[in-house]
């Protein structure tokens, strides 16, 4: 058992000069004082729950669709250095065989992963999307969600989240199918109307994938999926807070409409994350990164080079949202959105996934299951 004393951020609050007590791999308490244990003073730091990234395609030169377990492990280690303690490796739209290979690679990566962020499932982003809003997805491999294909792609117990366009043929039965299997459904890459979106909610959808991006624009006479995402309390909205995908005033609009409890910070990171500008690939498509912005040859954005620690800095410093709320949006809220109750907060018995931030919100330490896996010094 050990303690970390500092400014503890959890549950939407800051507890200044309190002690976080860790026992083995879990949280024991958050308390003013603790006796008979070794306590390290981190007075000038913020101690926060580990971040949970439910939408990340790659980093440091590796892409989930490469189907390389060792590459996924390298990605997990990189994410841990940026405060992510749990994540969902996220696929892009390719042929079924390539997707199944990627799923198998993630399963193998879990066995190999020792010091990286925990892999807690897989997010399938596609292939059940609308070509009209495909974004950086390969249109050649977009298909309808038939029962045969659904059963094949969701056979692995690792499938936790699927992005689907609710207006395409077969989408509503597919959403019901996934809900019955305990798979969470996010709506995105979609031309859905407001009515289409409501039908999807009734079928079991609970999230919106990267709100504002890859979807029908808002109109006051047809709010569409975007309007439903803002107005319907049953939907939590993923946000890419890099200042490229969304203006920070638009993020404030979402915050005012939804409250922090319904916003999920995601990276949507691709293989160039953590590397310099240059030429890369995302799901088999050529991507050029300039000034940190990855784009296809026609100028469309192709994922991001964002990390969740930077997202939190942006939310606090540019969207002007309080740090305790920003931390929730990167930890407890994404965890809760996929049914993970044992991570994302410092409740008694939760996994001791901990990030220490300095006063400038830089990650200086990451603990996973109570074990130090990253230190900047």
Image (tube, rainbow, N blue to C red):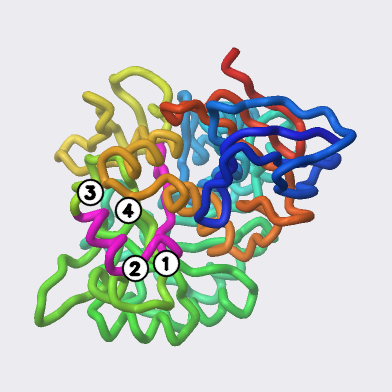
Q: Counting residues from the N terminus, which is met first, the one under dot 4 or under dot 3?
A: 4
Of mark 2 and mark 4, the one earlier in the sequence is: 4
The residue at the point 52 percent across, 55 percent down is 123
Q: Which mark is residue 236?
A: 1
Q: Position of residue 214 (x, y in %)?
A: 26, 57
Please, is residue 129 above or below residue 303 in the view?
Answer: below
- Binning the other alpha carbons within 10 Å of mark 2 as few (below 14), some (14 to 19) or many (20 upward) gives some
Contact check, label 1 and label 2, Cβ < 8 Å: yes
Q: Which residue is mark 4?
A: 140
Between the residue at mark 2 and the residue at mark 3, the CA separation in whole angstroms equals 16 Å
Give the vertical position of 32 relative to 58 (above or below).
below
Q: SS class of the residue under badge 2?
A: helix
Residue 309, position as x, y percentages in the image: 45, 35
Closest to the camera, between mark 2 and mark 3, is: 2
Q: Earlier in the sequence, mark 1 or mark 4?
A: 4
Q: Is residue 335 left or right of residue 125?
A: right
Of all residues, the one furthest to the right in this rendering is: 36
Estimate the spatial distance between the alpha carbons at disc 4 and disc 3, rounded to whole Å: 28 Å
State which tag comes first along the sequence, 2 or 3: 3
Q: Quadrant of the N terminus?
A: top right
Task: Assign a secondary structure to mark 1.
Answer: strand
Q: Is residue 266 magenta?
A: yes
Disc 1 to disc 3, how far (Cα)?
A: 17 Å
Q: Which residue is mark 3?
A: 246
- What stretch of residues is rendered in magenta? 250-270
Res 69 visible: no
Q: Is residue 280 magenta?
A: no
């Amino acid at each position: 058992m050990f303690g970390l004393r500092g400014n503890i951020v959890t549950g939407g609050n800051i507890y200044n000069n309190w002690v976080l007590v860790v026992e083995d791999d879990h949280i024991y308490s958050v308390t003013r004082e603790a006796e008979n244990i070794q306590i390290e003073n981190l007075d000038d730091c913020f101690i926060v729950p580990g971040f949970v990234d439910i939408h990340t395609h790659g980093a440091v030169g590796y892409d989930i669709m490469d189907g390389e377990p060792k590459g996924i492990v390298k990605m997990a280690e990189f994410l841990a250095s940026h405060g992510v303690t749990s994540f969902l490796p996220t696929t892009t739209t390719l042929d079924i065989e390539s997707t199944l290979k990627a799923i198998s690679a993630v399963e193998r990566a879990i066995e190999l992963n020792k010091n990286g962020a925990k892999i807690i499932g897989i997010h399938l982003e596609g292939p059940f999307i609308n070509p009209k809003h495909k974004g950086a997805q390969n249109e050649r491999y977009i298909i309808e969600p038939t029962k045969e294909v659904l059963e094949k792609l969701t056979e692995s117990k690792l499938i936790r989240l699927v992005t689907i366009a609710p207006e395409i043929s077969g989408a509503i039965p597919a959403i019901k199918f996934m809900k019955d299997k305990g798979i969470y459904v996010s709506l995105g890459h979609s031309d859905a109307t407001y009515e289409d979106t409501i039908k999807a909610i009734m079928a079991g959808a609970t999230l919106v994938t990267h709100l504002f991006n890859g979807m029908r624009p808002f109109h006051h006479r047809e709010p569409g999926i975007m309007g439903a995402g803002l107005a319907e309390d049953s939907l939590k909205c993923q946000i890419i807070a890099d200042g490229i995908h969304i203006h920070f005033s638009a993020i404030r609009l979402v915050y005012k409409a939804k409250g922090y409890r319904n916003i999920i910070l995601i990276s949507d990171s691709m293989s160039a994350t953590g590397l310099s500008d240059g030429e890369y690939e995302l799901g088999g498509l050529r991507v050029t990164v300039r000034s940190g912005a990855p784009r296809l040859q026609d100028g469309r954005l192709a994922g991001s080079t964002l990390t969740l620690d930077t997202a939190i800095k942006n939310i606090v410093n540019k969207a002007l949202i309080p740090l305790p709320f920003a931390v929730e949006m990167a930890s407890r809220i994404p965890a809760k959105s996929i049914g993970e109750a044992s991570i994302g907060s410092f409740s008694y018995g939760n996994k001791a996934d901990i990030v220490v931030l300095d006063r400038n919100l830089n990650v200086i330490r990451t603990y996973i299951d109570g074990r130090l896996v990253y230190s900047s010094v």
